[in-house]
Image: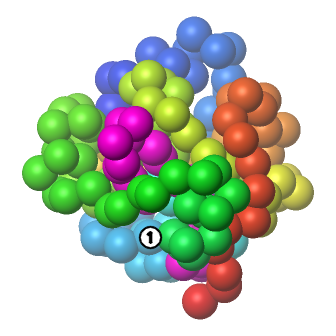
Amino acid sequence: MAISLTLLEFLEWEGVDYELLHHEPAFDSLHTAEAAHVPGDQLAKCVVLEDENGYLMAVIPATHELELEALNRQLGRNLQFASEEEIADLFEDCELGAIPPLPEAYGYETVVDDALTDCEDIYLEAGDHTELVHISGRDFQHLTEAAPHGYFSHHL
């Protein structure tokens, strides 16, 4: 499958330089980081949430776990995890579990954990289980600057 068409068009529209990294198939973010030989704290992952206001994508490092209650307090919302069926419908050009953590490319609301703020390099799921996109931390900050930021995850 390679890079999702939506993500590719978004990166090109934004003028972001990127590198596509191939790795052995991996089906969760920690194993993806290991397979691609990249630091897990620099691999951003997307957690899909929902409430009565719609969908929200929380972007956190692969080495972290989302603190849903902390995020709900920060945002004043009652978010819950979206179902796999909903996620598949939202990201039709991606394999389940390989959602690019740039939901703005798909038009969804985003919140970014500040644990990713100071990374020199960021790695993103490309939309399948064998490719990652490598961008600079500076470009990631630019792409997510309009999203709310905060601390709402903890290291595993």
Q: Residue sitting at 17 percent across and 57 percent down?
A: 84
Q: Where is residue 153 in the image (x, y as percent from the top left)?
A: 64, 73
Dominant secondary structure of the magenta stretch? strand
Q: Is residue 150 magenta?
A: no
Q: Can residue 26 be seen in this view?
A: yes
Q: Position of residue 70 (x, y in %)?
A: 63, 70
Q: Which colour scheme is used?
A: rainbow
Residue 31, quarter of picture: bottom left
Residue with the mark numbered 1: 29
Q: Residue sitting at 44 percent across and 30 percent down?
A: 108
- Give the magenta-colored segment's residue range: 47-65
On the rendered image, what quadrant is the C terminus found in? bottom right
Q: Where is residue 89 in the image (x, y as percent from the top left)?
A: 16, 37
Q: Nearer the viewer, residue 96 or 71?
A: 71
Q: Residue sitting at 29 percent across and 70 percent down?
A: 27
Q: Residue sitting at 34 percent across and 42 percent down?
A: 52
Q: Is residue 13 above or below residue 57?
A: above
Q: Can residue 8 be seen in this view?
A: no
Q: Is residue 51 magenta?
A: yes
Q: In this view, does 39 lie above or below 135?
A: below
Q: Nearer the viewer, residue 85 or 35?
A: 85
Q: Nearer the viewer, residue 32 or 19?
A: 32
Q: Position of residue 22 (x, y in %)?
A: 42, 54
Q: From the viewer's perspective, tell me whether residue 5 is left or right of residue 62.
A: left
Name the residue at the top extreme: 13
Instruction: Identify residue type, mark 1.
Output: Ser
